[in-house]
Amino acid sequence: MPSVVSYGRAPEVRACGYCHLPTGNGRPENARLAGLPVEYFIAQVKAFREGTRKSFVDGRAPTINMTKTAVAMQDQEIAAAATYYASLRPQSFVRVVEAAEVPQAEIAGWLYKFNTVAPRQPLADRILEGPEDFTQFELRDPDSRYIAYVPPGSLALGKRLAQTWGDHQELECSSCHGPGYKGKDQVPGIAGRSPTSLVRQLYDFKSGARRGGQSSEMDKVVKYMKNSDMLALAAYLGSLAP
């Protein structure tokens, strides 16, 4: 593990492994890095550095911290982190569950903490994702597991959208992201990613917060997407094996 992943470099280069974990499988508030193509990884860090990759939420701390780190990183540090994470096997620790009613949840940092004692509440048209064991999660255990609650019917709708999207239903996610959505060439795999992480990226593309490079290929995908479309697509993709 290179030093930039395990320790970072004071004062602004945060250790990659602190947020994205040494395994590279990440957490719902950030992204999975394991198995990313080296060139793609480097391009994304430089996009943060150059300001072409932002968050549609002003003041979102994980994005701000990532941007500060990217600005301070040296090119050789970016390359070292990219090579390390590309060598790792992507894994999924999220269980996608369709449910009309879900545990009550409170905001804890940048995700939800479930209250399994309180009466359940209607889910409505949203994703509610959080760790099964919050204490284990806070210890940054890379084996922490998550539940993503989604509305009934989301998985079937998401599968249909992944296979037939666009003005003439001509777009299919696998055409760019590869068979099983596990990545192809310099395009990342999206199977088994955190559903909330996937929704954030779709919304970033649609809002224009994420642009430049190959992100323009996503413009025609997100152009007419409603929030419910993003939710269903993310639920389906998140349910797959990476």
Image: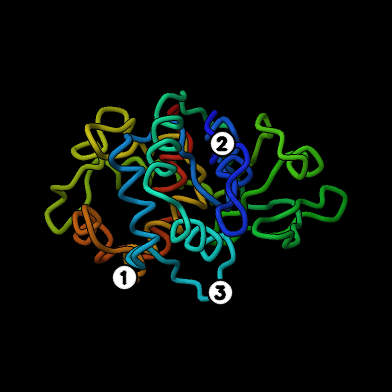
**Image coordinates for residue 74, horizontal then vertical, percent:** 42, 50
Closer to the camera, 213 or 146?
A: 213
Please identify the quadrant where the C terminus is shown.
top left
Measured from the top left, where is residue 209 in percent x and y? 36, 69
**Which residue sits furthest bottom?**
58
Choose the circle earlier in sequence order: 3 or 2: 2
Q: Are marks 1 and 3 in contact (CB under 8 Å)?
A: no
In this rendering, the label closer to the viewer, 2 or 1: 2
> Which of the 4 image quadrants contains residue 213?
bottom left
Q: Which mark is residue 3?
A: 2
Q: Amino acid at mark 1?
A: Gly
| Viewer-side label of 1, 3 | 3
Q: Residue under circle 3?
A: 59
The tag earlier along the polypeptide, 1 or 3, is: 3
CA–CA distance in space, label 1 to label 3: 16 Å
Name the residue carrying label 1. Answer: 208
Element assignment for label 1: loop
Q: CA distance from mark 3 to mark 2?
A: 28 Å
Q: Is 181 displayed left or right of 123 in the figure?
A: left
What amino acid does circle 3 point to? Answer: Gly
Query: Which quadrant of the structure image shows residue 182?
Result: top left
Mark 3 crowdedness (10 Å alpha carbons): few <14, some 14-19, many ≥20: few
Residue at point 35%, 51% (across, down):
44
- At horizontal 68% and vertical 52% (from top left) the residue drawn is 101
Q: Position of residue 150 (x, y in %)?
A: 55, 49
